[in-house]
Image (tube, rainbow, N blue to C red):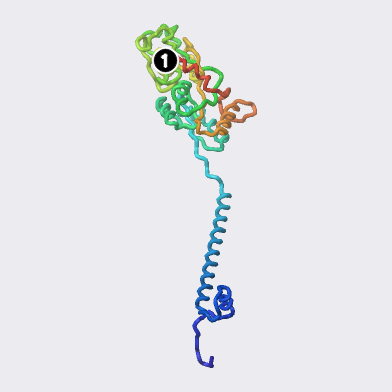
Amino acid sequence: MGCGTSHLEPFRLRDTGLVSHCATKFGMKKNENKSSCRMHMKTAASLMFRALLVAASLFLAFQYTAVAEDAPPPAKSAYIFGVFPYLPPLEMEKLYAPIVADFNHALNRELQLASKTSFELFTKNLKDQTYDVAFIQPFDYVNTAHHYGYVPLAARREKLYALIVTTTDSEIKAVTDLKRRRVGLPPRDAAISHLVRAFLRKSGLDTEKDLELVYFRSHSSCLNQLIAHAVEACGTSPTAMNQLRGSMSNQLRGIAETDRVPPALFVVHQRVPADERKRLLDTIASWGHPSNPSQVRLNGYFPIDDAAYDEIRKFPAE
């Protein structure tokens, strides 16, 4: 290259021994066209580049798998805890909120408290299998829940019965005095209503002809209407009577107790895993134990099975 002269040679693959090595490697004669050797070398380079891409892809896939394995598991879906509507909403919330908190802790899963405004709508939800866990009356278990995948979990040992009460100033002294009277009851499908109707028939009264049955939305409504003299007697539960405040309880007196049947119970749907069912049962059984700091006001619950409700199955048909 002379001084002051600019000369750029085009880039060429020079024979620095690689081309000769290529010729030997691919079985070519030295005087063969060197361009063929260069083609083989480019092909080898392309294959090597592809191999590197595959290796990089495998490395990234391994890294992604490792991250996925270290990620926390997805949150569990919430369970629905249904309670049959035997209490006004505010009272139900107050009584069952601590139960929901205990169940949440036992299962490490959110539970949502739910009910309905009527027994009919609640029973429909049982048929639709809406609830994962539920507290239900015995007639709903036998007539509905048992057929839709629910199994018994726990109940109290004390059997359920109804009281027939009237006011202290009433002339009614016995059940037979209810003939041609207005008798109040909770909703038609409530267990207490079943018990009272059966007891009235057993006492010789035709519930269709001999007296008028008036159904209210709740036990408290029935008792309030009795005190107001809108009805002359009321069929209710001992629990409802115990919840009366102040002078109201002094205005009422009982005239009869019905026959007794297995009580309301906790049930769980079969889709809930067996280990979670056990944790629910253990939690229910712990209520009222001296070492348990739970705020739940219910206690005295024990495991119960389907056979315990055969008595309901033999209950007189209406």
Q: Residue at x 51, y 70 (%)?
A: 43
Q: Quadrant of residue 175?
A: top left
What is the quadrant of the C terminus in the image? top left
- Point out the residue furthest to the left here: 209
Q: Residue at x 42, y 15 (%)?
A: 317
Q: Position of residue 271 (x, y in %)?
A: 50, 33
- Point out the residue furthest to the bottom here: 3
Asked if one can make out residue 284 in the rendered structure from this viewpoint, the answer is yes
258 to 146, vertically: above or below: above
310 to 126, vertically: above or below: above
Q: Residue at x 40, y 23 (%)?
A: 217
Q: Position of residue 192 (x, y in %)?
A: 45, 18
| Numbered circles on residues, count | 1
* Amino acid on which the number 1 mark rests in the picture: Ala
What is the quadrant of the N terminus in the image? bottom right
6 to 37, vertically: above or below: below
Asked if one can make out residue 247 in the rendered structure from this viewpoint, the answer is no
**246 or 46, nearer to the observer:** 46
**310 or 95, nearer to the observer:** 310
Q: Position of residue 35 (x, y in %)?
A: 50, 78
Lateral position of residue 240 relative to residue 18, left or right? left
Secondary structure, mark 1, is loop
**5 or 217, nearer to the observer:** 5
**245 or 101, nearer to the observer:** 101
Q: Position of residue 267 (x, y in %)?
A: 51, 27
Find disc 1 in the rendering and name its residue: 317
Q: Quadrant of residue 211?
A: top left
Label 1 neighbour load within 10 Å: few <14, some 14-19, many 20+ = few
